[in-house]
Image (cartoon, grey):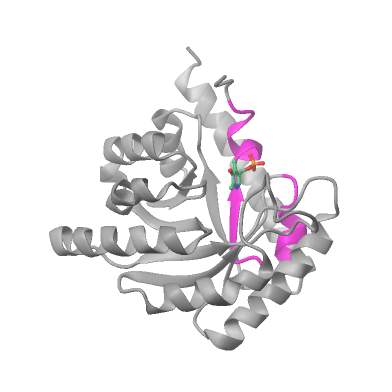
Amino acid sequence: MEDNAERMADLAERLAAVQRRIDAAVQDAGRAGDLPTLIVVTKFHPAADIRRLAALGVRDVGENRDQEASSKAAELAGLGLNWHFVGQLQSKKSKSVVKYAHALHSVDRLALVDGLERAIAAEQERTGRGALDCFIQVSLDDDDAGAHRGGVAAAEVPLLAERLAAAAGLELAGVMAVAPLGTSPEAAFEKLAAISAALVAEHPGATAISAGMSQDLEAAIRFGATHLRIGSDILGSRPDVG
Ligand SMILES: *Cc1c(COP(=O)(O)O)cnc(C)c1O
């Protein structure tokens, strides 16, 4: 077992380093005073690390598997964290996700919106919770619809946006993307910024852009990211999970 104080110091140092990178990128982009929301992606790392991060001032955490996220969220319910679901979601998991998630970054099909709408209605009836913020995940791959990094083609965004905007209990927040492997993240995020602008023209409230991971947060900030999803540069490499 790693020593608690040592792990705490390690996380504090890594978090501060990422915050310095964010500050510098915000300055470079001429976005002073417009800090993006930092979501620390804690997947595969223990709840104890999330407790440590909360003690360091982290308010937003991200997870990509429902089972892991729901058990961590239940264990850490007292911390008042915002839980962001960033992984692919099966419609049947909607009921579970609406119990703990503040935002869902991976809406990628109409059928999922149907499931979410039913689930959030039941959950709001039961607990009076607020709306679920929904990001449309967009594929930025040039070839076959982003087979491996997920998301819809840009041309499919308007229909999905219209459906989300009309759904009770779901708030159309904006777009999300993962930069494709093997191309420049700048080019990818520039494309995402254009997709976002087209979306905002139709849905003025849907201004959020969830983009930027450990490797490419500077490029994402340059092209308008409002939400960063950072895992390994804060938590270290993920433990092997087969
Ligand atoms: C894991 C993950 C991240 C964090 O990636 P790092 O490279 O570890 O910063 C961000 N977004 C999504 C969708 C992820 O699955």
Q: Is residue 228 magenta?
A: yes
Front residue of 26/205: it is: 205
What residue lies at 43% left-to-right and 37% top-to-bottom?
Answer: 50
In this picture, is 200 found above or below 189? below
Measured as percent of width and height from the top left, residue 115 is found at 34, 58
The answer to whether residue 224 shows anywhere in this view is no
Residue 65 position (above or below residue 159)? above
Please say whether residue 49 is one of the residues in the magenta stretch.
no
Viewer-side residue, 55 vs 81: 81
Question: What is the magenta range?
Answer: 215-238
Q: Quadrant of residue 164?
A: bottom left
Whether residue 84 appears in this view of the structure is: yes
Please name whichever residue, 141 or 23, is drawn nearer the observer in this view of the structure. Answer: 141
Where residue 136 sits: x, y (%)? 54, 64
**Residue 101 image point, x, y percent:** 36, 53
At x 78%, y 68%, the residue is 190
